[in-house]
Image: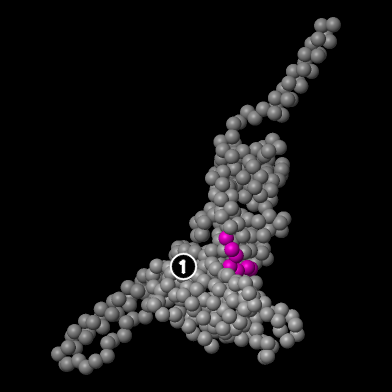
Amino acid sequence: MIRKVLLGTALLLVLVVALYVRFHHSAPPLETAYAGNRTVTVYSTSAQVREQVASVSFGDRLEVLQRFQNQVKVRTTTGVVGWIGEGDLLSADLWQTLKDLEAKSATMPAVARGHTRVPSNLRIEPGRDSPRVRQLNKDIPVEMMARQPELVAPAANASAGEESVDASPPESATPGDHKSNDRKSKSRKSDARKSDAHKSEDKPEPKREDWWLVRAHLSDQAVLAGWLLGRFVELDVPSPLPDYATSAGMRIVAWNELNRVPSASGKPMAQYLLLGIHGPEGQPCDFTSLRVYTWGKQRDRYETAFVESNVCGKLPITRLQSAGPAVDITFSFLDASNGAPERRTYQMHQTIVRLVRDGNAPKPRKRTR
């Protein structure tokens, strides 16, 4: 009898210990974090010789138990304990910032669409030093909402193999007649100009690059918001806009379909507002040139209906369509050509586009071609 009691007690103790080990977390978590990559492998140890004990997906909740160099000991929601790289972890604060960014971007209109041309890091804020949200694979579709230029650190320029900014050319001598006794003065001015030129060469203008707030459409149908380096995006510009932009010597930034009109074949053809910029990236203006392309039914091709190249436009474009048989299109944007942004409004009636309100000038300015 005593033997049976002892055996039952031993079995009960084993059961209690097993339940304790299974459900009791001896190590309280230091903090809560989230998996920061599409798939994160959890390893048995932080050593080089290790085995996989679990895997978690992007956004899975993890408890941080310990940190060692660039390795983090975590516990999954299923109770598995293991190690992952610190770069595969998003803190609770970053995760909340990401959620706020997603909510903000959901209310913003897309100004352009494209796809990643190379594997690209999606970041919380614009800039290479900003925390990474997740690495996007090549050919991930993205919607672009807002642009922000950011300074490029010299170290980043060197590491990326980018060309340095050309130094400003030396100032040319002022034309005019000089007396012989002015030679010394002229020589001093020339030396000063050379000195200024050397200073300009020693201290080139800081380079800037374009960052875009995007919505990335992932393969698992999830939508993720963040900031992406603009040159890593290949724009999906509808044909034939790229050909027109190339002939005009401008780089496309955004575009907007204004309306659709019937063609000779009866097929509806889109008419476009094209926004672009001349020169390198990182400029203060989102776009400096706008063009309207309408469909010419007689010639059965696109024609340039309107050109404006004297703006410092800010995205997005506000577009309105009036009711009625004429169906006029009105679009506007903020223009910072003269400092403080003022709204410029254009109206399109059939194939005629005109500036109807310019907050920066007392008289409307229009240039048609």
**Horizontal placement of 202 versus 285: left or right?**
left
Q: In which quarter of the image is the N terminus?
A: top right
Q: Give the range drawn in magenta.
A: 108-114
The answer to whether 171 is drawn above or below residue 61 in the figure is below
Determine the residue located farthest toward the left in the rendered image: 181
Q: Is mark 1 on a helix, strand or loop?
A: strand
Is disc 1 surrounded by few (<14), some (14 to 19) or many (20+) residues within 10 Å?
some
Q: How far across and how far down the image is residue 200, in percent?
A: 35, 74
Q: Which colour scheme is used?
A: one colour
Quadrant housing residue 19: top right
What amino acid type should be assigned to the residue bearing mark 1? Answer: Arg
Residue at figure coordinates x 61%, y 31% from the top left: 27
Asked whether 139 or 303 is in front, the reply is 303
Q: Where is mark 1, residue-wise?
A: 208
Residue at figure coordinates x 49%, y 64% from the top left: 148
Q: How far across and how far down the image is residue 33, in percent?
A: 59, 43
Q: How far across and how far down the image is residue 301, in percent?
A: 67, 87
Report if residue 76 is visible in the image: yes
Magenta-span inclusion, residue 203: no
Determine the residue located farthest toward the top in the rendered image: 1
Asked whether 48 or 309 is in front, the reply is 309
The answer to whether 73 is drawn above or below residue 6 in the figure is below
Report if residue 253 is visible in the image: no
Q: How far across and how far down the image is residue 37, in percent?
A: 64, 52
